[in-house]
Image (cartoon, grey):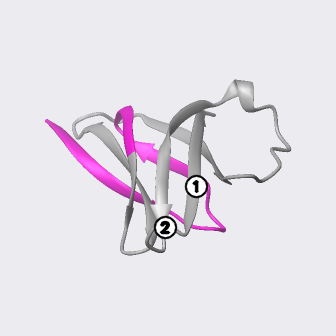
Amino acid sequence: MKRIYKYTLTPSNKVLAIPGCLKIISVESQRQEIVVYALIETSSDTTKGFEFLVIGTGHDINVDIDVYEFLGTVSMVDGTFMFHVFYREIF
């Protein structure tokens, strides 16, 4: 069965292992946290790993950004901070 699950990104955890992941679908802010939504196949026994980058507007990018896919931009603290989220599959 397919479902949509939510995963929270934290400053110390930008790698997620997502069981049954079919697709990363969106990123949002919720209660001052950055959350990622993924489409999951609950009957699958596979797990995919994803690395996420969260980059603030105007901040230096010190990695090869071309190997990541842009997911979206989230607003935090009533629009005071804007973060741009990128991801790539790592396993």
Q: At which x and y percent is residue 73?
A: 50, 47
Q: At which x and y percent is residue 12?
A: 66, 68
User: Which stretch is magenta?
Assistant: 1-26
- 73 vs 34: above or below: above
Residue type beneath disc 1: Phe
- Give the class, few, some or many, for how many residues have Cα within 10 Å of label 2's Cα (few <14, many ≥20): some
Cα–Cα gap, marks 1 and 2: 8 Å
Q: At which x and y percent is residue 4?
A: 23, 45
- 80 vs 74: above or below: below
**Residue 21 part of the magenta-drawn span:** yes
Q: Name the residue at 58% across, 47% down.
A: 84
Residue type beneath disc 2: Met
Q: Quick check: marks 1 and 2 in contact, CB under 8 Å?
A: yes
Q: At which x and y percent is residue 25?
A: 35, 36
- Give the class, few, some or many, for how many residues have Cα within 10 Å of label 1's Cα (few <14, many ≥20): many
Q: Is residue 39 left or right of residue 23?
A: left
Task: Give the quadrant of the C terminus.
Answer: top right
Helix, strand or loop status at disc 2? strand
Nearer to me, 59 or 51: 59
Q: Name the residue at 49% across, 67% down.
A: 76
Q: Name the residue at 29% across, 37% down.
A: 39
Q: Residue furthest left?
A: 1
- 37 vs 91: above or below: below
Q: Which residue is mark 2?
A: 76
Q: Name the residue at 81% across, 31% down.
A: 64
Q: Which residue is mark 1?
A: 83
Helix, strand or loop status at disc 1? strand
- Quarter occupied by residue 66: top right
Q: How many circles with numbers are drawn on the protein?
A: 2
Q: Is residue 85 left or right of residue 53?
A: left
Q: Is residue 82 left or right of residue 35?
A: right
